[in-house]
Amino acid sequence: MRNYLKYAVVLILAVALLALGGISCSEEGTTGPTATPKETYKVGAIFALTGFNSPLGEPQKPTVDMMVEQINAEGGINGHLLEVTVYNNESDTVKAATLADKLIEQGVLAIIGPTGTGDSMAAKVEAAKAQVPLVSCAAGSVIVEPAGNNTWIFTTPQLDFVAVERVYTYLQEQGIKKVALLCDTAGFGAAGRAQLMGHAFLDKYGLTIVADERYGTYDVDMIPQLTTIKGTDAQAVVCWGTNPGPATVARNMKTLAMQIPLLCSHGIAFKEFIDIAGTAANGVVFPAGKLPIVDQLPDTDIQKALLEQYKADFEAKYGFGKANTFGGHAYDALSMVVEALGNMTEGLSTAESRAFIRDYIENDIKDFVGTGGIFNMSPQDHNGLPRDAKQGMILVQIVDGKWTWLQD
Amino acid sequence: MSSAQFVQYLISGITSGSVYALVGLGFTIIYAVTKIINFAQGEFVMLGGLLSFTLIHSAGLPLVPALIISVLIAAAIGAIMYLLAIRPAKNASVVSLIIITIGVAIFTRGIVGQMLTKDFVRPPSFSGEESISFLGAYIDPQAVWVIGTMVVVTIILHLFLNYTMVGKALKACAINPVASSMVGVNPKIMALIAFVLAAAIGGIGGVVLAPLTPISYNAGVMLGLKGFVAAAIGGFGSPVAAVFGGLLLGVVESFAVAANWGPFTSAYKDAIALVVLLLILLIRSGKLAEEERTG
């Protein structure tokens, strides 16, 4: 009987492991057919499909899958089918570097991602060493600045300092002088905090930091920090982090009957924030790309057609309300690589193709309409989006549980 | 610090502390009976929270049945964990069994992440969202539920362990498994009951906590760590000591944010749990060694 039980457990664990293996295999699966008339263009992607960054990384894989399907259905790129291998780095920086290596060994022509700033910092070292172009989906300016030292590295989201300055322009317009900071201790929050505390911005917008509080991503509540902030003469709270901290902050501020406005980063531009924060989400202001408020854009907006198309395609496949700016960053990254491939001559070696894609993105991505904005890459700028805060990002306010364009 | 602020910090600390206490209770129950430190304890809290959300939103169940079913499922998973992972390896050393619990924790996180959701979720509050004013401080009504649940669970557990036959058998088994088996107490059954109880208490913690703070499939790690510290402060002895440990930890964390001095700032809130743990272990190390010799 005892032996029988032992075998049963081994069997169950084996089945479970196989099932898990199956799941991870399907996550790491490749898209696109194999038998082709011309050589298939291979591209790699690294996204955080699990772990703390997964709310950002999750829409990126379906975005890439959808694009590959569309491109191949229309006959590929100049007759070459596109194949994108997506790996999940589980929000782990070490895995991001290992997977970049693995993709490079497989001979990919370019790498899309990783999702997070820390992950991108790890992966870019491998990409640069092997001279493979890497188009990151993370907002940390450290990834691509200065561009001269990051020859092979590009990134598509609006950079963190643009988002910070956009928040500060709003505070200035509201006549706010005293600000309380409440930042996540993890990567994105810490990088944002460094920008928020920058003297250049504080002097430019006449702001004083009266409280500098931090929180852990899994903290049960932020009431102690907010009690401290409530005891200061802060006129606004700026909370820098992604899921789920800012939602808890919004709820806790409501509990404490705090009347001052709450501003957050572009890291809350997904529907889950509103689901979790409930009515406490109302009134929250954050900088973002135009995707969240695409329905409110005038028809003259140059990005509107693209944004509507992406949103409609994505949501038809993956469900209403699922499209968000983070999937958009992957869309922009792959679009640039695809455009480069479309202009590539036949018969280049792998190394020559990689160099061609790099050169093309740096020099020929001009007036490129993406979901994040209009890109103008150059040898000095490997992000390409407008650096001026007001041109680079819009402000979104949550009104009655809906994203509303806050025009100023 | 004004008195209203003081009350606010205190209540916030007690709220977080109540959650840690509920996790700590689970640690002590299993440890007492089996000497296993169950590192999957935080996962039961996560299960309770995520299951209640799933049952309310996806299955459309009303609040009360959803809560009861969530706790029952968590308890059942505790039983399954014991029967399939712990009991078949019963000849293994305690260290191996502890490693098995870590495996169960990782396994549970993976399964829940794949089958339920990877998103952070928050089920509806039990009694509205309007905060209650108390001595100049404001309290989320759900925080009252959390604190109240912790108190009720602790009292019921205390009565159960001291005034029922099964409870007394559990205590007997904890004190001396060999002697208690001689008088007809089956240690295997007692271990099963301990796992079910611990899982149920974790599940209860999860269902009351989730409306207050968003929960995701990997939220159990940090909760498990804090609960472990709570139980360690209490010396893995009586459940009441674990509750005291949890509350102490919560209040220390809260006032560390208030102090804003030296290392006592909000940036190091989580590290404080570990510092408290180290201090307790240092203070208690002599006593623990003594217990090791005599026990």
Image: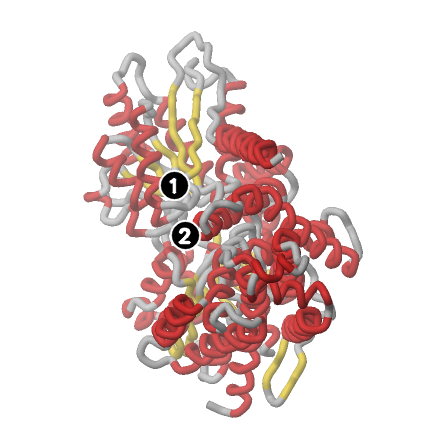
Q: Is residue B85 above or below residue A175?
A: above
In-front residue for pair B115/B190: B190
> Residue at position x 66%, y 53% from top?
B189
Query: Is residue A377 something one can see in this rendering?
Result: no
Q: Where in the figure is residue A219, as x and y percent of width and height?
A: 49, 65
Q: Secondary structure at mark 1?
A: loop
> Residue at position x 28%, y 22% from top?
A353
Q: Are marks 2 and 1 in contact (CB under 8 Å)?
A: no
Residue A392's mark? 2
In-front residue for pair B270/A263: B270
* Residue A184, picture quadrant: bottom left
Dot 2: within a 10 Å radius of its alpha carbon, few (fewer than 14), some, or many (20 or more) residues? many
Q: Earlier in the sequence, mark 2 or mark 1?
A: 1
Residue B266's mark? none
Q: Secondary structure at mark 2?
A: helix
Q: How is the image coloured?
A: secondary structure
> In whole angstroms, how far apart are the C-alphas of marks 2 and 1?
22 Å
Q: Does residue B89 appear left or right of residue A359 in this picture? A: right
The residue to which callout 1 is attached is A114
> Residue at position x 23%, y 31% from top?
A131
Q: Does residue A86 appear left or right of residue B24 in this picture? A: left
Dot 1: within a 10 Å radius of its alpha carbon, few (fewer than 14), some, or many (20 or more) residues? many
In-front residue for pair B202/B79: B79
- Name the amino acid type tagged 2: Gly
- Name the amino acid type tagged 1: Pro
Disc tally is 2
Q: Is residue B266 above or below residue A382?
A: below
- Which quarter of the figure is the C terminus of chain B placed in? bottom left
Q: Is residue A209 above or below residue B182?
A: below
Q: Where in the figure is residue A164, as x and y percent of width and height?
A: 39, 61
Q: Where in the figure is residue A258, as x and y percent of width and height?
A: 56, 78
